[in-house]
Amino acid sequence: MKPSDFDSIAAYMDAVGSAARQAATEVARADTAAKNQALITMAAAIRRQAATLLEANAQDVEAARAKQLDAAFIDRLTLKLSTIETMAEGLAQMVALPDPVGAITDLTARPSGIQVGRMRVPLGVIGIVYEARPNVTADAAGLCLKAGNAVVLRGGSEALRSNLAIAACVHEGLRAAGLPETAVQMVATSDREAVGHLIRDEAHIDVIVPRGGKSLIERIVREARVPVIKHLDGICHVYLDADADPEKAVRIADNAKTQRYAPCNTMETLLVHQAIADTILPKLCKIFRDKNVELRGCARTRAIISEMLEATEEDWRTEYLAPILSIRIVDSLDQAIAHIAHYGSQHTDAIVTENLSAATRFLREVDSSSVMVNASTRFSDGFEYGLGAEIGISTNKLHARGPVGLEGLTTQKWIVLGGSQTRGQIRT
């Protein structure tokens, strides 16, 4: 369906929601074989249509550059052959994952003779609102489908050509499996009014997942009537402990910051124990400077690296998404944990240490959706966690947390298996 077929955006979005709700019923009862067939065909179509996807994306990128959008935005928008292959591989990995729908757990016999357990079931209809990441189209479609849900996708206007090209591959997969194309719908308008209708459509939408900048997510959290799975910031920390192996510390901190600057799991603040600062910081900061990373440090850090800019209070709470890094020297593990608790965003934080006690305390006491020991924060990702792909990162505590894959796109209901028992029945 097209927006031009309707008198208003409201009427169009209502039709999209209604079609999604109807499709959700069919997808929820689809068997694993049908869903996997759809995923296999989607992946094959994406690989086969790589040139078409790149051409559509090139038009989007050219238009974004003409608007003088920033480098981080362009980076998120740009598709390459490697990212197209990653999309296809993500769909292929989903085929190999166990189908969560219908799984029964915790089945327990009760004194009455009944058995009580839980069954995993789809959420229903999921709305995804995202900006400049065309790969979300494939990831979200595949994950929602495998978890038995229908999905309404509303990508940013800057990526509309790319998203529609990817959606065509997705629909090819749905047709091949005999599933309704309306199980995955791309909102075909850039009108911001469409977002407002989507996030307030309690009649048709069960949950909203926003992926984009802080202003987008804040708007959705503020205006939504539908439950939201979200994170606002990715202010990720790496703490180099007093007992860190120097080689590991340098390698991990370098990767956490410079492997890519735009993702939400990139390190934004480096914390260094005072006992190793004099030896670690000169080597590490040279690497950062050689890679043109702007460094901003506390007074103690600047006493070691004099050419570093002074960090402000605002720097500690800023997600740069750029080659900028804040560095602070701390006196202890306690001070590092306190800094993360005060300035962090509960996204991803890591410690580098050979001290088991320090590592255990960090894992237990840092209240983030992903907490790591001796690993780069860049691993906080559904693909790396073996989820096939992710629908997003959640810093919620309910209902999903961290990278949201198949299980996060389902819920549970209680089931009872009986043998004609009645309440109050006396067993003999």
Image (tube, rainbow, N blue to C red):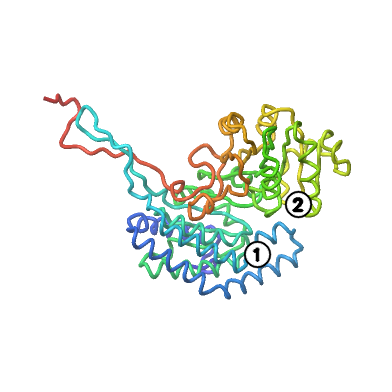
What amino acid type should be assigned to the residue bearing mark 1?
Thr
When asked about the image quadrant of residue 318, the answer is top right
Residue 178, above or below 319: below
Residue 374, above or below 332: below
| Residue 389 on image: x %, y % | 51, 55
> How many tags in the picture?
2
What amino acid type should be assigned to the residue bearing mark 2?
Pro
User: Which secondary structure, mark 1?
Assistant: loop
Q: Residue at x 58, y 59 (%)?
A: 155
Q: Going by the image, does 37 lie left or right of 164?
A: left
Q: Going by the image, does 404 lie left or right of 218?
A: left
Q: Which residue is mark 2?
A: 323
| Residue 284 on image: x %, y % | 76, 45
When asked about the image quadrant of residue 402, the answer is top right
Residue 243 vs residue 150, the one in the foreground:
243
Residue 296, above or below 367: below
Callout 2: 10 Å neighbours few (<14), some, many (20+)? some
Q: Residue at x 24, y 32 (%)?
A: 109
Question: From this viewpoint, which residue is outermost toward the right?
Answer: 306
Query: Label for residue 78?
Result: 1
